[in-house]
Amino acid sequence: MGKTISTLTAINELIRNRFQTRHVLVIAPARVARDTWPDEIKKWDHLTGLTISPITGTAQQRKTAANQQADIYTIGRENIPWLIDHHKNHWPYDMVIIDELSSFKNPQAKRFKALKKIRPKINRIVGLTGTPAPNSLLDLWAPYRLIDNGQRLGKYITHYRGQYFTPGKRNGNIVYNWKLRDGADQAIYDNIADITLSMRTADYLQLPEATHQHITVQLPPKARKQVDTLKKDLVLNLEDDVIDAANAATLSLKLQQLAGGAIYNETGDDYITIHNEKIKALTELIDQAQGNPVLICYWFKHEQQRILDAIPELGVGFGEVFG
């Protein structure tokens, strides 16, 4: 639906023509903050000259990027507490964009608490999401608490629940789920309508049966060097193991393993983890799916265990298809 380019166009207008914004912070999944927003600026002629500084990498790299002069700064949501501590009382961003706003649905999460603390210093805040309430309308409270400081849905989630919901299944004082009161859904929609733009793909786009999205994963410098060494020398020393590619077919197979993040040792009875960049990208995709079914295909058996270790919630209702 073009959320990113629409937002960048608005930012460009606010900075260049209206002079209402100076520095914009974009909070997004790590890969999106590092790649998607900078790449989107390069695609459009009317955004030429708009500068961007991704606050990613090591602590020193993030510090350098945060101190650099730019119009837009992007950062992974897990680093929000770090950024607030870095700037301390000198918060420089007068506008904040939260990409994937629904990832702030948990009011107990560190990212929510950190952003809520700094919220009074933000003049303009925008949330973008394709799944505003992935589980129920209870999920709306925390994002809108950040957007309007609790003006529309209340400052406290207990008040929000009490006004629009009734306890469902419970055990004593423990409530396992909440049910909407009659008419509460429309009341919630009416309360947030003045600051909410909702667009459905069915109303605006003719989509094919399947869309294909290619996710580029950048290898860490050390892993990149290991790949280059194996390609050049056909031999790679890894701690107590020596990886030997005897021919082109073996080399191709081992390079695939390295790109995925782990490689089998020479005996094939164990594997050595090299990096987790590909699994991090998968984790972001699972998070964006918001509980919808996901089919994951993997090349090597060890990838299954590494995926389940990194995303333990997949173990619930996890099934395998062999072929």
Image: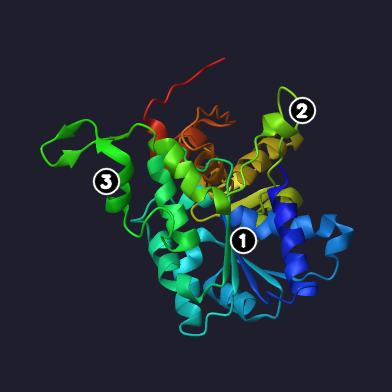
Q: Which mark is residue 5?
A: none
Instruction: Answer above or below: position of 11 versus 283.
Output: below
The front one of 150 and 187 is: 187
The answer to whether residue 308 shows anywhere in this view is: no
Q: CA distance from mark 1 to mark 2?
A: 44 Å
Which residue in the structure is indicated by mark 2?
A: 206
Residue furthest out toward the right: 45
Residue 217 lies left or right of residue 194; in this view the side is right
The location of residue 80, given as percent across then percent down, is 48, 66
- Kindly identify the residue that appears in the image at 32 percent across and 53 percent down: 157
**Residue at which label 3 appears:** 162
Q: Which residue occupies 43% across, 60% down?
A: 151
Say few, some or many: other residues with alpha carbon within 10 Å of mark 1 (under 14 / 14 to 19 / 20 or more): few
Q: Is residue 89 left or right of residue 125?
A: left
Work out whether residue 192 or residue 201 is closer to the camera in this orientation and state it: 192
First reached walking from the N terminus: tag 3 or tag 1: 3
User: Quick one: which residue is furthest to the bottom in this view?
Assistant: 90
Residue 222 numbered mark, or none = 1
